[in-house]
């Protein structure tokens, strides 16, 4: 007997019992019912309840039968799973206080959109200090450059003194030579010769002293130029510090790394978040897949990149094309989400079917992760897809 016939007979029995005529009510005092009649009435209620339970069980069995997927035949395999998406945590680089949150759970966000803002009061103060250091370093450069000019002027003066003493030394040498010649001829005194000799030696000493002053001036110039280089380095360091602080200020504006939907708002306003702590979790709706399990016989025939079809329980009228993007290398016991306990007792291979990102972008406002469904895979590429598994997408 089929399920439909059982349901029909159960309904007829319930109608027959319900149509039994009731006794008319009398205005006179009601006589006590016989014990047999009370027993029959009680037994009738029990029978009616049993029939109602049978009708409900039959209807449930019929509904379950209708909901079972049609067999897809050889060359194909299937498994149940849920849509999943890549979850991305939006986190600050540095510890700080959460100042603002601009989105709520369920909101769509675009890549680069500011979704939250960390407090930047400390960073702004550090930037002000670094800018002050930069101005001070620039002033030191001006002072050191003027010092270089002054030391170069000192060297010029020292060189002029050297030239002057060299000229005097040359004159003294000439005078000494003349005195020596005149002394040999007896035309000058010994005293005059000694004076000219002393003058020549003094001139030579003056030249040496002037040359030492020139060398000291050169050294002072080198020192002043080194101070300029140091001041320039301080300027570069201050500029680098400002750039680092400004980068940290920019990074304090937490941005969405991809297009997606806000899944969780983990942190609340004024909470202190550690470096790398989670402020928001965003689901990338362009990277959605279904994870399901296949037996070793099916998984062994499945190739990476093979075609798949996804049918969601919430929208069985649509068939979504997908591609096999992952097949586990090691078998495992399947989780409790697998339909039957016999399947959970066997080792299965985890498989992932990924939906084309272009399809997801087209229907991004309708994409919802967590929906259960069935994944169908084609093990034999020579087999055409059944008509009921041909691609059907929303218009």
Image: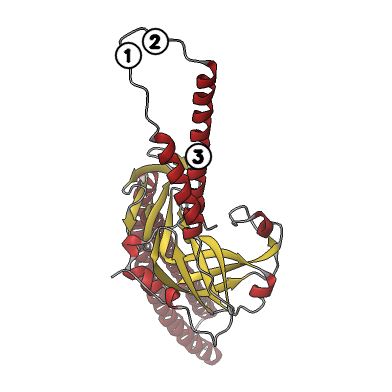
Q: Nearer the viewer, mark 2 or mark 3?
A: 2
Outermost top residue: 29
Q: Which mark is residue 51?
A: 3
From where the camera sits, is residue 334 visible? Answer: yes
Rendered position, 317 above or below 252 = below
Which image quadrant for residue 20?
Answer: top left
Question: Which residue is labeled 2 in the image?
Answer: 30
Outermost left residue: 395
Label 1 Cα neighbours within 10 Å, binned few <14 / some 14-19 / many ≥20 = few
Q: Which mark is residue 26?
A: 1
Q: Nearer the viewer, residue 93 or 193?
A: 93
Q: Quadrant of the N terminus?
A: bottom right
Whole-Å distance between the Cαs marked 2 and 1?
7 Å
* Residue positioned 46% across, 81% down in the render: 169
Label 1 secondary element: loop
Rendered position, 38 above or below 214 = above
Q: Which of pointers 1 and 3 lies earlier in the amino acid sequence?
A: 1
Q: Is residue 84 left or right of residue 268?
A: right
Whole-Å distance between the Cαs marked 2 and 3?
31 Å
Q: Position of residue 162 (x, y in %)?
A: 43, 76
Q: Position of residue 140 (x, y in %)?
A: 37, 58
Q: Position of residue 384 (x, y in %)?
A: 49, 84
* Residue positioned 47% across, 59% down in the render: 66
Q: Which of pointers 2 and 3 lies earlier in the amino acid sequence?
A: 2
Q: Quadrant of the C terminus?
A: bottom left
Q: Are marks 1 and 3 in contact (CB under 8 Å)?
A: no
Q: Which mark is residue 352?
A: none
* Residue positioned 50% across, 71% down in the render: 212
Q: Are marks 2 and 1 in contact (CB under 8 Å)?
A: yes
């Amino acid at each position: 007997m089929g399920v439909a016939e059982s349901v029909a007979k159960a309904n007829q029995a319930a109608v027959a019992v319900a149509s039994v005529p009731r006794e008319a009510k009398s205005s006179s005092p009601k006589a006590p019912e016989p014990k047999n009649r009370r027993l029959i009435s009680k037994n009738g209620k029990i029978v009616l309840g049993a029939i109602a339970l049978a009708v409900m069980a039959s209807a449930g069995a019929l509904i379950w039968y209708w909901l079972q997927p049609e067999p897809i035949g050889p060359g194909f395999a299937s498994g149940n799973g849920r849509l999943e998406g890549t979850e991305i945590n939006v986190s600050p680089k540095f510890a700080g206080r959460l100042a603002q949150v601009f989105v709520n759970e369920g909101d769509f966000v675009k890549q680069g959109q500011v979704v939250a803002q960390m407090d930047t009061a400390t960073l702004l103060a550090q930037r002000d200090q670094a800018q002050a250091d930069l101005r001070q370093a620039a002033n030191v450069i001006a002072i050191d450059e003027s010092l270089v000019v002054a030391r170069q002027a000192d060297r010029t003066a020292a060189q002029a003194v050297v030239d002057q003493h060299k000229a005097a030394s040359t004159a003294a040498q000439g005078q000494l030579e003349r005195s020596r010649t005149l002394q040999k001829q007896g035309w000058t005194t010994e005293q005059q010769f000694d004076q000219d000799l002393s003058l020549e030696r003094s001139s030579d000493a003056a030249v040496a002293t002037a040359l030492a002053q020139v060398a000291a001036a050169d050294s002072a110039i080198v020192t002043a130029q080194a101070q300029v280089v140091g001041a320039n380095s301080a300027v570069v360091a201050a500029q680098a510090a400002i750039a680092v602080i400004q980068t940290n200020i920019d990074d304090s504006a937490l941005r969405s790394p991809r297009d997606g939907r806000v899944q969780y708002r983990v942190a609340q306003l004024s909470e202190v978040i550690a470096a790398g702590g989670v402020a928001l979790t965003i689901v990338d709706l362009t990277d959605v897949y279904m994870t399901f399990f296949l037996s070793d016989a099916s998984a062994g025939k499945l190739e990476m990149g093979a075609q798949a079809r996804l049918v969601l329980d919430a929208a069985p009228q649509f068939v979504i094309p997908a591609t096999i993007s992952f097949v586990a290398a090691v078998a495992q016991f399947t989780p409790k989400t697998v339909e039957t306990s016999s399947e959970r007792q066997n080792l299965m291979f985890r498989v992932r079917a990924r939906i084309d990102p272009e399809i997801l972008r087209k229907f991004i406002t309708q994409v919802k992760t967590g929906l259960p469904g069935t994944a169908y895979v084609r093990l034999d590429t020579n087999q055409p897809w059944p008509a009921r598994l041909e691609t059907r997408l929303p218009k």
